[in-house]
Image: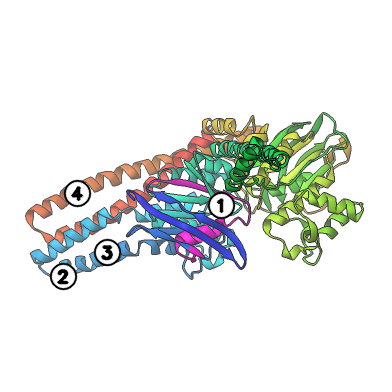
Amino acid sequence: MINTMLATEGLMHRYGAETVFEKISVRVHKGDRIGLVGLNGSGKSTLLRILAGLQEPTAGRVVRANSVRIGYLAQEPQLESSATLFEEMLKVFEKLREQERELHRVERELARATPDEGLLRQYDELLEDFRRGGGYEYQSRVHHVLAGVGFTDEQKPVAHLSGGQRARAALAKLLLEEPDILLLDEPTNHLDIEALEWLEEYLSHWKGAFIIVSHDRYFLDKLVHKMWELEFGRLYEYPGTYSQYSALRQERLERQWKLYEEQQEFIKKSEEFIRRNIAGGDFRSSQAQARQKILEKLERIPKPIIPKKIHLWMDVKRPSGERVLRARDLVIGYPKTLLVRCKNISLQRGERVALIGPNGSGKSTLLKTLVGELPPVEGVFELGQGVEIAYFRQSQPELENPEKTVLEVVLENKDQTTLEARSFLGQFLFHGDDVFKKISELSGGERSRLALALLAQLGGNLLLLDEPTNHLDIDSREVLQHALTEYQGTIIFASHDRYLIQAIATQIWEIREGQLRVYRGDYEHYRTQRDLTPVPLPSFSPSPLSPLPSEGEGSQRGEGAEGSRGKRGEKPKRLSPGKEQRLRERQRAKLAAREAELMTAVTQLEHEIAQIEQEMEAASYAGDHQRLTELTQFYRQKRQELESTSEQWAQAAEELARFQG
């Protein structure tokens, strides 16, 4: 049990008469980084809750080492509070804040009267404990973690947060608590790519152990060194990352099939030999009896169960022309809120574009504009000859009627017989009475499979996909990935699934700070180029602007190669190149002045702190306790000022570098 933080012995769990899993005996050691995968409904969340002590198993037990602290994040965490986001995070550090209050109390006592040696020793011990416990850093940690998971408004009340924001807040709070074992159930569900990369970096330095349930294959590849798979009620352990597990799993299944088939062949031959020779009284009869005894004692290898997968094929009925899409000076958004400016983009037949960017940056709005649901605010985009769009939304309107059945939805989507529709739904794992389930009765995974079935029926040659992997388990994601790889048309897909992006994308379109930037190549190439290329300061930010002319309608999507040009009122006036250059120069000068001002302030504060430290040393040597107390308060105040000003200086320097880049 050396370094064993948690162990299970013969865990089994049932829901009613159904056994979810059984015979699970595992150990978690200090430093373990474990990924837990399995089909939807295989019991992953239940296992985490049992390990966390929030649910009792039907049989078996969980042994936890003394003093081990376990932190658990549910898929849909319930974070209820009347505090602001920042105040809620500070609750993690209540012990430090109590020490801080005690320090202030002792400081007031020291200031009121001539202190005795006992009070001074108490103050020194409190100060040292506070420092060792991270008293001077805990607020900075809160700022860092909240920013990492994507929050910009720390003063927003928790009660006003959306469901996704509350999930991110719960994750931030758990990370700040620093338990010995982290149990995370789908922690990446509500994170954009930037937050995902931050979380990967943060967890890569985690001192304890963690077990992560995730469908994000890229995330698992980056972080884990051991995989647990729940399959048909049993848990299988594999060393390595997700990709290594995937290869080892395939080898295991092939080995199981080979052993099963070899044993079946042996049984078949033995039974045939026994049948032909058992009746006689000769030597062969003795052999037959011996073989019969062998078969009776033989431990039969069970037939390997292969998980059912959806069968997805997206056909292109008619290919498009060579040029699929072209846009010039396109601005998308709404009349009072511009979201994305796309200077010049072009797309050829067969290309696969991954559309990425922070949550709320305008990815879905861009797709809606390309499909014709929203007009452009400015500019022009043209679809090529013969382009037929098939559009997959994050929320599918076909699935909005809760009383419709799966079969009814598919029959309404395409003219076909009931028998054809049921056969088609079988390819998406809707068998028997499943087709009569109401939309309101479907799980998230079932809804997503049904949406993919509807998409497969459309037959377009330009796929616009908005988060197509949401709610899909890993096996279904791999099926979708294979289908998109084999697809003969053109694809633009918004996704946070970096494994999918890396596998199929030929271009990356990144939306950042109101600008769309095009990177040729796969996701890893994009990351390299992004880290080398400064992002220019945008000419506008995604924020409310003065209203644009409202007369007329924006551009509508044209048919074929005719393209689209909006009918708008008077266009906003554009600056001449000379005036625009002078404006940019004034902006650059302001940024440079601000950066220089903050750098001077940082230098001045560092100088003042050095002087205070010298005065504190002198007061301590002279036994001037009242002066030492005053200087300590002043020192802490200046340290906080330095921390805040340094942050502002770093931001200003980064902003200036982006502008000059």
Asked whether residue 512 is in view, the answer is no
Residue bearing the label numbered 3: 99
Numbered label attached to residue 613: 4
Q: CA distance from mark 2 to mark 4?
A: 23 Å
Measuring from the top left, give residue 129's x and y in whole percent: 23, 57
Amino acid carrying mark 1 in the image = Arg
Q: Which residues are magenta?
A: 31-59
Query: First in sequence: mark 3 or mark 2?
Result: 3
Can you tell which of label 3 and label 2 is closer to the viewer?
3
Q: Residue at x 52, y 33 (%)?
A: 531
Observer-nearest of 478 and 161: 478
Can you tell which of label 3 and label 4 is closer to the viewer?
3
Which element type, helix, strand or loop, lies under badge 3?
A: helix
Q: Residues within 10 Å of mark 1 (few under 14, many from 20)?
A: some
Query: First in sequence: mark 2 or mark 4?
Result: 2
Amino acid carrying mark 3 in the image = Gln
Left or right of 322? Residue 57 is left
Measuring from the top left, give residue 54's x and y in whole percent: 47, 65
Decide: is 193 above or below 5: above
Q: CA distance from mark 1 to mark 3?
A: 48 Å
Q: Residue at x 87, y 34 (%)?
A: 385
Query: First in sequence: mark 3 or mark 4?
Result: 3
> What is the quadrant of residue 111 in the picture?
bottom left
Residue bearing the label numbered 2: 112
Numbered label attached to residue 320: none
Q: Residue at x 53, y 66 (%)?
A: 78
Measuring from the top left, give residue 299's x and y in whole percent: 57, 46
